[in-house]
Image (spheres, rainbow, N blue to C red):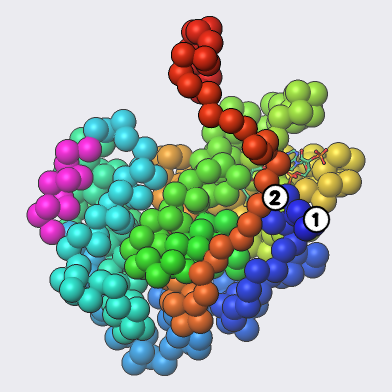
Amino acid sequence: MAEIKAGLEGVVVGQQDISFINGEVGELIYRGYHIDELAPSASFEEIVFLLWHGKLPTKQELDALKERLASCRALNDSQMKFLKSIPHYARPMSVCRTGVSQIALYDTSYQTLEVYERGTNLARADNILSQAPTIIAAFSRLRRGFKPIPPREDLDHAANFLWMLNGKDPSPEAVRAFDLYLVLTAEHGFNASTFSCRVTASTWANIYASVVSGIGTLSGHSHGGAVQAVMNQFMEIGNIDNVEPWFNGCLETKKRIMGIGHRVYKTLDPRAPHLRAKVQELSKLSDNRKWYDIAIKLEELASKNEYFQERKLYPNVDFYSAPLLYMLGLEPDMYSPMFALSRIAGWCAHIMGQYENNRLIRPRAEYIGPKGLKWTPMEERGNFGADTTL
Ligand SMILES: CC(C)(COP(=O)(O)OP(=O)(O)OC[C@H]1O[C@@H](n2cnc3c(N)ncnc32)[C@H](O)[C@@H]1OP(=O)(O)O)[C@@H](O)C(=O)NCCC(=O)NCCS
């Protein structure tokens, strides 16, 4: 009988050269560059180029990428009409998933949609990466009762998103904070959503379908859905004096603390210190330390607690992403879409990588159900009423 690893933990299912994670020491490397090397200087567009092409861009290459991305941002009338038809109570993550799926409908290279040529997929990746922020920003404004703001071609990716969200020039500090968030969350090995993208791509489904699979997988709270849950948890705690009683309550009721723990990292997530420092910086600038203080206190309590120590549970990327996005003025249910906007970069790199060396991903599971049952005619199945749990 085959050995079964629940949740595929520790199972190596392929090779890739996009990113490397060492969960024991807390190391994350994009295409050979340690995240600590990239975080202080890289822009999101540079990371996109690095992930898609395997090297840092020259100035000319970066300018060309920025120009291409900026030129793909605008939505067509049908897309805008669709966004206006969405009820205000829709979840932004559902809008993100459906809106990205919709981009495929207007691909003018439709006749070659089933062609997996790299140039075609790079153009499609540009489209997805550029239009997803426009979709999310437009929906955010519509549900707040405002008109969507068209994208600007003179702004970089992070600045343009904040512009479309608020209709005013974002501060350089806000742009840098959001850009840093995008840089740090752009790629992360064979995580659940990336694996999902690869499974879909392995059937030779197109890049749009593959990214949509990734968005669906990202939405759950064991993955990208946690970032919203983290902020809700900080709001529930409410003030610094309540952190300890709240933490003790979690221990008593065995409630999981969101933003803590990771399948791979058995130490502090290497993205967390960069985000923590940025939250501290934003807190000073805005003269509001509340969320930073709550997060720091909670991290400290968890780090000193035996339960968390024994299980090697430390803050993950979501723990400080939540207050960072909050301080940029985003509502908590927008956080998972923010994760998607950034991870599209990594997903597309993996999907293109999958096409280049493809074999259908098709694992097996051990069957533990019955065999040899005989068909029972309807009149012999009894009449005990419907099982409403089915
Ligand atoms: C990320 C996560 C899903 C990883 O899950 P996993 O690798 O399957 O680990 P498990 O669920 O098997 O947890 C291992 C042990 O740690 C405990 N644990 C894991 N995360 C915990 C948390 N956030 N709070 C309290 N206990 C936690 C589990 O209860 C389990 O304890 P046990 O051995 O006594 O049963 C998990 O840590 C989690 O749910 N974290 C909170 C949600 C979150 O932040 N998700 C974003 C991830 S980037």
Three-letter amino acid code of the residue under disc 2: Glu
Q: Is mark 1 within 8 Å of ligand 1?
A: no
Residue 366 - label: 2
Element under disc 2 = loop
Q: Quadrant of the N terminus?
A: bottom right
Query: In this view of the protein, which residue sits in the foreground, 140 or 364?
Result: 364
Quadrant of ligand 1: it is top right
Three-letter amino acid code of the residue under disc 1: Met
Describe residue 7's horizontal placement relative to residue 172 as left or right: right
Q: Which residue is mark 1?
A: 1
The region drawn magenta spans 76-86
User: Residue 204, relative to residue 56: is it above or below?
Assistant: above
Whether 224 is among the magenta residues is no
Describe residue 184's horizontal placement relative to residue 8 as left or right: left
Gap between marks 2 and 1, in whole Å?
Answer: 8 Å
User: Residue 363, relative to residue 232: is it above or below?
Assistant: below
Are the two marked residues, 2 and 1, in contact with CB atoms closer than 8 angstroms?
yes
Q: Is mark 2 within 8 Å of ligand 1?
A: no
